[in-house]
Image (cartoon, grey):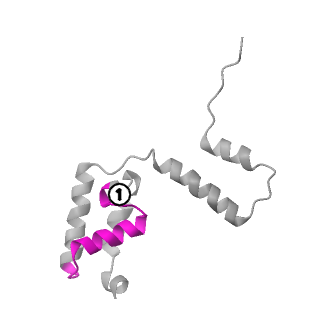
């Protein structure tokens, strides 16, 4: 009878693959970027209520600072490395709200 295989975590696989290896910082960067990309595919994105709150905050920032809402969306998306606000991971929702509260568009755009 064969022993059932146990599933290993991504961290265990990474540690096993790099054990005893003398990797350059570039190699490590490539490995970890791929590792993070795999984790991102399983992340839950913001729900509808959170999305409405984000768009409300984006509208407020745009109105208050006399900047187009699309520009604020673009800055937010760029800051978090996402394509659209809708694809923001749910775990970053609170951080994104705080980012928008502190955002000074004139320092970024000009």
Residue at the extreme bottom of the image, as rendered = 110
Residue 110 lies within the magenta run: no
The residue lying at 36 percent from left, 56 percent from top is 88
The residue lying at 28 percent from left, 48 percent from top is 47
Residue 24 is drawn in which quadrant?
bottom right
Relative image position of residue 57 (x, y in whole percent): 24, 67
Residue at the extreme left of the image, as rendered = 63
Q: How many marks?
A: 1
Relative image position of residue 86 (x, y in whole percent): 30, 56
Residue 75 position (above or below residue 94):
below
Identify the residue position indicated by label 1 in the image.
Answer: 93
Q: Main secondary structure of the magenta part?
A: helix
Residue 34 position (above or below residue 42):
below
Circle 1 packing at 10 Å, graded few (<14), some (14-19), many (20+), is some
Residue 85 lies within the magenta run: yes
Q: Quadrant of the N terminus?
A: top right
Is 37 displayed left or right of 85 in the figure?
Answer: right
Relative image position of residue 19 (x, y in whole percent): 77, 48
The residue lying at 20 percent from left, 79 percent from top is 64
Residue 53 is drawn in which quadrant?
bottom left
Q: Quadrant of the C terminus?
A: bottom left
Is 62 displayed left or right of 1 in the figure?
Answer: left
Part of the protein shown in magenta: 64-86
Relative image position of residue 26 (x, y in whole percent): 68, 65
Relative depth, front residue between 106 and 31: 31
The residue lying at 63 percent from left, 35 percent from top is 8
- Disc 1 is placed on an element classified as helix
Relative depth, front residue between 57 and 39: 39
Residue 80 is drawn in which quadrant?
bottom left
């Amino acid at each position: 009878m064969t022993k059932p295989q146990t599933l290993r975590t991504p961290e265990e696989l990474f540690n096993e693959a790099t054990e005893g290896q003398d990797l350059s910082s570039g190699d490590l960067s490539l490995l970890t970027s791929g590792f993070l990309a795999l984790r991102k595919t399983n992340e839950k994105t913001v729900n509808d209520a959170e999305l409405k709150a984000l768009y409300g905050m984006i509208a407020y920032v745009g109105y208050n600072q006399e900047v187009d809402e699309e520009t604020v969306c673009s800055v937010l998306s760029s800051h978090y490395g996402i394509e659209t606000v809708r694809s923001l991971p749910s775990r970053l929702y609170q951080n994104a709200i705080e980012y928008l509260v502190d955002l000074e568009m004139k320092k970024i755009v000009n």
